[in-house]
Image: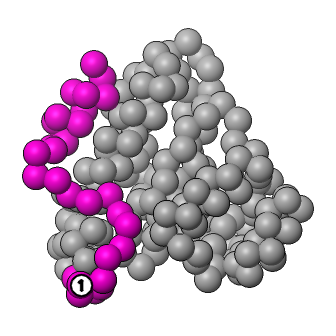
Amino acid sequence: MDFVHDGLLNGIKFRSFNIIDDFNREALNITLDTSLTSKRVIRQLEQLIAWRGKPERLRVDNGPEFIAEAMETWANSKEIDLKFIQKGKPHQNGYVERFNRSYREEVLDVFSFKRLKEAQLLSNAWLWMYNNERPHSSLGYKTPVAFMQERLRGYASPTFLHEKEFSWNSLINSATN
């Protein structure tokens, strides 16, 4: 889990709360808002747990949202271990840092957004493409979804499933129109 900062054309700043699964590099969440407090992070995590199940641990940096008492209380109540990286060592959370770089280079630096909703729609479209169409060298050049489905061998797992009638271009067009 980590955050990325950006801004709208009118100068309003926003943040992106990103979560990926270290096992299969699947991007599980991109939430955009002008304020993302520890309570909002917890709400997003609750939604993710309802969708995918509870993780054993969460790797986080030492940002205020993650070191907040509310976050610690929540994690303890859910029996989820918070693994904090060392201060000044972002490489210890390398998978999400790499994801953040791709997201920045391919979405935030390429598009200018007038509204937060527009940025969220485009981010969701990119997230789908990232999980379903983009092979990863670390996964043997499989997509995160294909890699996970191969590992599950017949077990159903909620994910951003690939549907043949969708493509990156159609998702971008629907997000920007």
Residue 55 location (% of width, % of height):
58, 77
| Residue 28 versus residue 94 in the image, above or below | above
117 left or right of 173?
Answer: right
Is the residue 56 above or below the residue 120 in the image? below
**What amino acid type should be assigned to the residue bearing mark 1?**
Gly
Figure quadrant of residue 69: bottom right
Q: Which residue is mark 1?
A: 154
Asked if the magenta segment contains residue 8, the reply would be no
- The image shows a total of numbered marks equal to 1
Q: Is residue 73 above or below residue 132?
A: below
Can you say which quadrant of the picture contains the N terminus? bottom right
Q: Image point 10% across, 45% down: which residue?
A: 165
Q: Which residues are magenta?
A: 150-177
User: How far across and how far down the image is residue 21, in percent?
Assistant: 46, 70
Check residue 161 for magenta coloring: yes
- Name the residue at 49% across, 48% down: 30
Q: Identify which residue, 48 or 169, lies in the foreground.
A: 48
The residue closer to the viewer here, 39 or 112, is 39
